[in-house]
Amino acid sequence: METKSKRLTINTLIYCAYFVILLFFLFPLFWVLSVSLKSIPELFASPLVWFSSNPQFSNYTYVIQKTEIINYLVNSIIIVIFTIFFTLLIAVPASYALSRYKFRLKKPFMLAILIFQMVSPVVVAIPLYRLFVQLGLINLHWSLILVYIAIQLPFTTWFLKGFFDTIPHTLDEAAIVDGCTRLQALCKVILPVSTPGLASAAILVGVLSWSQFVIPFILLDDNKLFPISVGLINLQSTAEAITLHYLAAASIIAILPIIIIFILLQRYIVGALTSGSVKE
Amino acid sequence: MKNESNNGAGIYKKAQRKPKKLGNSPVLWFIPLVLVLLLVFVYPIIEIIRFSFTDAGLIDRDYTYTLKSYFSLFTSPGFFNMLFVTGFFVFFSVTFQMMLGLAVALLVDQGMKRRLHGTVILRTAVLTAWAIPGVIIGIIWTMLYNESNAGVLNYILSFVGLDSGIAFLSDPINSLISVTFANVWRGTAFSMIMIYAGLQTISKDVIEATLVDGANAVQRLFKVIIPILSPVLFINLIVVTVETFNTFDMVMALTGGGPGRSTEVIALSIYNSIFRQFELGQGAATAVVLLLINTLMTVIYFKAIEKNQAVN
């Protein structure tokens, strides 16, 4: 429908826009990477140094050896894995039931779940802090993971309900007619065909839990237990101006896992995000 | 949670009528979910509302019930300043995130349709910004906004004649703009992906029909695409607004609410009242204000979804 020259013009314009947008989104990341490889004189040099002439990889070894950053990463990985597992374990039956059963008050029940999704974590963290102090549950990963799970549950339940809605009811009903219970139908018939939905949910829970900050910030005060987000704030508050390059190196170490996961799984993530928002 | 038992009873009756189709009651399936939500959401929300009517400190067990917290909250000039800061932050973040998100979504959509190279790279780059923890985004932007020789934004601006250097984070008004700008960088991806998903649902026939009509690209955008997208845009608006009202981590890392209280958004204000000034009552009262905003938004959101489903 378009002539060749018109198409060329439009494509060129699109590429120009691509360039501007890429610059806007990647420049901050480039800058942190650049700072993380600088030596101290280069850090404050005038005119500004774009690329270190002698990249200081020792900044990274310094951060790894002198700070708890590896420990923070391990904590984050542990917390995120348990959060994903238990969130799915709880959300799958609930969302399956929401998708298959009809009952009165289903709408208010779903609205209630949605309200929790919208509640700011800082609001719930404060009474939980008091409660956990009284019960001696403060500074424990288990109690922290429980809160992480609760924060992920509303969205995951809605998301999986939407996914289960797309699976034909005849599939599990046939299994029930054949003598399966509901639970057996879910485990043997529905779950095997739900891998894409479960994988998307797991990825989203993983990314959101990796970023979680308010909850561990309020519920933990033991440096050894911090996940990466709180660990970084801790480093930032102890860092002087002279250690900017170390803070940058720590930031790169902290976002590296997310960026690698993103590049590997970005197809699924886009799938997860788009299918979720269409159904909502 | 009286509703729960009512649900059970309702289902039980239905189940007796149509035993084959319904199997057991769904209540069992919801028990773990409901227990976790009761403990981590319902109990704290009740507690925070209760505390908002007390004069309690952070960990005291002794307190009396009073309306003082609300009274001092609504009469303090800090409260209205906080509302202004939050309002500015939310309004401009949401506006620019959605506008930029729409623009990038349209570009990616066109790029995909024209099979242009680099489209996936662009999409991934934008989404990466969204996946980075807010705290780290805050730290990254402190480096960009740095006002010493190490600051790159001032260096770039010096090429366009702004030699004196901008006080990005040390001036109260500038810092609010700086925080909002960084938040636009962070949040655009979410709007982009939601709008992009919405664009995928527009059938080719609709677009082709407008091409036959001879509508140009701008007319197509405003007369066809945006009206079709309006439910998606509305839901996006609500979600992003709530998300922005709840923002805490990025601002904490970028300015900590300062200088002074010039970037103290509502979530940060709750935290500061309770953990810095040890005024649980006042912090709780602020939290109740935030909860009311959240609830109102959720109800609007739910109505919008229902209307959407009715249309589909």
Image (tube, grey):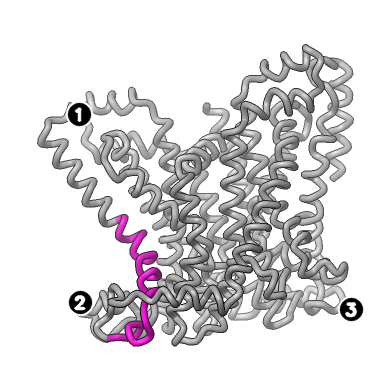
Q: Quadrant location of residue B67?
A: bottom right
Checking the image for residue B151, the label placed there is none
Viewer-nearest residue: A238 or A37 = A37
Q: Give the label, 3 or 2, closer to the camera.
A: 2
Q: Which of disc 2 and disc 3 is earlier in sequence?
A: 3
Q: Which residue is mark 3?
A: B62
Q: Chain of mark 3?
A: B
**Disc 1 and disc 2 on one polypeptide chain:** yes
Asked if residue B246 can be seen in this view, the reply is yes
Q: Is residue B36 left or right of residue B149?
A: right
Q: Give the label, 1 or 3, closer to the camera.
A: 3
Q: Are marks 1 and 3 in contact (CB under 8 Å)?
A: no
Q: Position of residue A169 (x, y in %)?
A: 67, 19
Q: Which residue is mark 2?
A: B159
Q: Amino acid at mark 3?
A: Asp
Q: From which residue to which does the magenta span run? A: A21-45
Q: CA distance from mark 1 to mark 3?
A: 74 Å
Q: Residue furthest left?
A: A5
Q: Quadrant location of residue A44?
A: bottom left
Local SS, label 1: loop
Q: Position of residue A16 (x, y in %)?
A: 21, 51
- Predominant SS of the magenta segment: helix
- Asked whether B61 falls inside the magenta stretch, the response is no
Residue visible at 70% across and 52% down?
Answer: A82
Q: CA distance from mark 3 to mark 2?
A: 61 Å
Q: Amino acid at mark 1?
A: Gly
Local SS, label 3: loop
Q: Which residue is mark 1?
A: B214
